[in-house]
Amino acid sequence: MRFGVLGPLQVLAGDRDLTPGPPKHRALLAALLLRPGRLLTVDRLIVEVWGDEPPASAEPVLRVYVSALRKVVDGIRTVPGGYLLDVDPDQVDAYRFERLVTAARRARDAGSVAGAADGLRAALGLWRGPALAGIDSAELRRAHAVPLEELRLTALEERVELDLALGRGAEVAGELRAHVTAHPLRERAWGQLLLALNQAGRRSEALTAYQEARRLLVDELGLEPGAELREAHARVLAGEARSPNMPNMPNVRNTPNAPNAAGSAHSPRIPSSPHMPDGARAVPNETPPDVADFTGRERVLDWIRRSVPAAGTAPVHLVLHGPAGAGKSAVAVHAATALDFPDGRLHASLAARTPGAVLEDLLRSLGCPQGAVPADLAERVRLYRSMVSGRRLLVVLDDAADEAQVRPLLPTGSGCLTLVTSRSPLSGLEAARAWELDVFDPGESVAMLARVVGERRVRAEPEAAARIAELCGGLPLALRIAGSRLARRPSWTLEYLAGRLDDEHGRLDELSAGDLAVRGSLALGYRALSDRERLLLRRLGALSAPDFAPWAAAAVLGEPADGPLEALAEAGLLQARGLDAAGRERYGRHDLTRLYAAERLAAEEGPPAQVLAAAAREILDRTRRARTMLLPAEPGSGQTLVRTAEQAAALETTQLRESARWLAAERGFLVATVGDFERAGLDEAAWRLAFYLTPFFELGAHREDWRTTAEIGLRASRRMGHRHGEALLLRSLADLHRMEGRLSEAADALQRALPLAEAGEVARTRHRLGLVHLAQGRPAEAEACFVACLAAFSAAADQRGRADALRALGGVRRAEDLLVRSLEVYRELGDPRGEAAVSLDLAGLCLDRRRPSEARTWAERGLGLVRRLGDRLPEAGGLVVLARVAMAEGRPDAARAAAEKALGTFGEYGDRRGVARASLTLAGALLDLDEIDGAVDAVTRAVGEFAALGDRPGLTGAQELANEASRRRGLRI
């Protein structure tokens, strides 16, 4: 079956035309075809079929329409919240069109001009008339027909450009004449017509066409022809027969489920919902602080205000684009802070980040448990759209690179507003409205200068202020830098700075030309710095992280950097971002400043590898020390340390909390630095930093960062042939797989690590394998691993390994003496986290032996330790044990309270195994309270989780309780 929307709606099954007749049926089918494989909510479809004033019976009537269409079209599926059309996108001509255009552009980029022209010709041949012709839906035409038509015109002009390069001007001249008649304001087409006529030997007609185009542009728009049309005119005057160069043409970006050049894309199924904590959903407010000296921009601000959709109407996506440094981000933030959206504001800085990484942050901001974020991008997109459905949100997407980066991040909820900033107009972004943010006019430029420098100084030298504004080209970034220099030097007059700027003729000419403008204005600020300040700024260009603490700046500078940092912030080249989680000041910079700094570093000192290599020691040392505070004795490194009683007493829990806070504050910086090390060829630093971060990621359930850094570290260790590093990173990935319930993958990673591990690490790797076996319900194999590990650790005098093995063996054998011995070793090591874990194990063992009083003592001791440490997941585990103690004491109310609190924490962090354990404990408490329905719900949840995780022992216990709940209620689950 084939579907057509590039013209009148068409449904063909072989030679049979099955196109539905009723207008509303056609509109509904068109809406589904334009987004194959994507969930469309009932509310969305109602708006697209009936517009802003649907009938009261719209929802039941929509169901009737769907039923009628199913008789004609296979694949219309009902899903929670709406419908989707489950067909291959390549069956829809609009998606085939985009695929063919993409393939043609790739051929063009590979040098196949004739092949690219033929490909674009084939793509354009799919069009049978105006997109969605005859479809009675203003919403669909606005959101889809207009972008498709624009893409068609662009593809046509690109094909003509290729034909001209092949000398086919005579063949396309007539086509171009019809094109400019239909679209008289498209200057590119007029320029192509001039060149085509000239190639055909009709030079006088080409010159007449230029005069016709110029007259039309002046009469209609009041504008002279642009650079491209003027260049074509100049070529005709110079007698050039054909275009010597093809201008760069932007690549088509596929919609999230659009086919690519290689074939069709199939959308995965909608993922099952994660376990969300009870209570009110998150109402985020992430908009950065407004700029204190924000100036002007009334027209664009008014446009944004007027574009805000009403509640219940289609979402609106606005793109603010313009030259680098035009203040796009400032406008977006200023507008966002003044708008009221009841369900909150989200903000994401895109830059070079992948849509998947950004979606993880957005999902967490919306309240998705940290570990419940799906790994697959398509599933993340579906979950994001489900979570924003029914919410009225404002989303700011800052510094977008292209359409493909933005599409998965657009909210679909009724009444939502998206503000996207980008250097590109993102012309291929469907249903988006764009505003080009130009430079300031002279009045706004002087006003901004006054806000930065001070009204008094500007009023004292108005002519010099106007001159500075003129020389800066009205570019806000250049004005801010110039104003910052004046503010730092109160002895300078404005006339003096104007004179300095006037000497930079080449750079000032570039100031009004996009990226070069920013580079020129940054150069002015750079030269005004002291030698030490310049050194710091360019060395910071070796780091890709968007912000950093003073210690990181000192690491790249090679000496304390507080003074230069403050000077750079005062000069407007860095921005103070306030205090981080560790209570330390952080600094950020615009990405263009970072790029400029990287350029200066390359020009003046060479590649960033030397700077990063010098900084690596400090970065690795700080991270290793923080890791050691989290898990004393460097677990898994083979390095052990037995502390004296005095040393153990000195290791205060406040220090341990500080290490976790430091890692939390530096998480983004350290993750980015792992990538920096890899790109600079510093493979050993890359894998070591990735390994050091593992326990922090595990403690905070930062699984995406864990996966990213561990994979980089694994690649790095393999490149340098470091078998030990490869083994450690495989073990790290195995721990991640085990946490996520992917036990077979965990076992495979550990089996691959075993032959690579050094002698001291073989036992620790086998210890992890035992934990996997235990989770798989294979206790005998787990016990064998633990016995062998204990012998190996004891022989090597590895006290940390010995403590871990004693604990694991004591758990599988239910042996109190082994657990007590493990506890003693953890105390000697000064590891309160290990001590707390074993205390909770002993509490569980005492419960099994019907000694509730001792169990409570152990549980309260373990819970007290983890609370002092501030570790929320271990605290939740302790609450589950305490709930079991309360049940043994005959206090089911207390048990329910503790289990519910634990369940909330596990759900927040996305810890599915914890959710299963807490649900099972809660079910038992509810049964004791004779709240049978609640118990059935809780135990059903536990059964589902244990089954999904492949946890056989847990599943057995849950099924036993489920049978008891069934018996009590008289039902079978």
Image: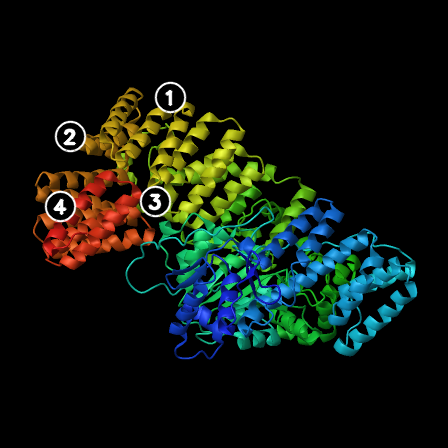
Name the residue tied to disc 3: 699
Residue at the far top in the pictured view:
795
Residue at the far front in the pictured view:
15
User: Is residue 503 placed above or below 616 in the rendered structure?
Assistant: below
Tell me the distance, in whole angstroms, between the alpha carbons under discs 2 and 3.
28 Å
Nearer-N-terminus badge (4/2): 2
Using a 10 Å C-alpha cutoff, classify the residue at mark 2 as few (fewer than 14 neighbours), some (14 to 19) or many (20 or more).
few
Residue contact at pointers 1 and 4, CB within 8 angstroms: no
| Quarter of the image where one finds residue 609 | top right
Nearer-N-terminus badge (1/4): 1
* Residue 467 on image: x %, y %: 74, 70
Q: Secondary structure at mark 3?
A: helix
The amino acid beneath tag 4 is Arg
* Residue 648 on image: x %, y %: 27, 36
The reply to whether residue 512 is visible in this rendering is yes
Residue contact at pointers 4 and 3, CB within 8 angstroms: no
Number of marks drawn: 4
Nearer-N-terminus badge (4/3): 3
Residue in view at x 73 percent, y 60 percent = 157
Camera-side residue: 928 or 545? 928
The amino acid beneath tag 3 is Leu
The reply to whether residue 879 is visible in this rendering is no
Name the residue tied to disc 1: 759
Name the residue tied to disc 4: 856
Using a 10 Å C-alpha cutoff, classify the residue at mark 3 as few (fewer than 14 neighbours), some (14 to 19) or many (20 or more).
some
Residue in view at x 10 percent, y 42 percent = 854
Tell me the distance, in whole angstroms, between the alpha carbons under discs 1 and 2.
28 Å
The amino acid beneath tag 1 is Ala
Residue in view at x 53 percent, y 28 percent = 720
* Residue 17 on image: x %, y %: 55, 62
Nearer-N-terminus badge (2/3): 3
The amino acid beneath tag 2 is Asp
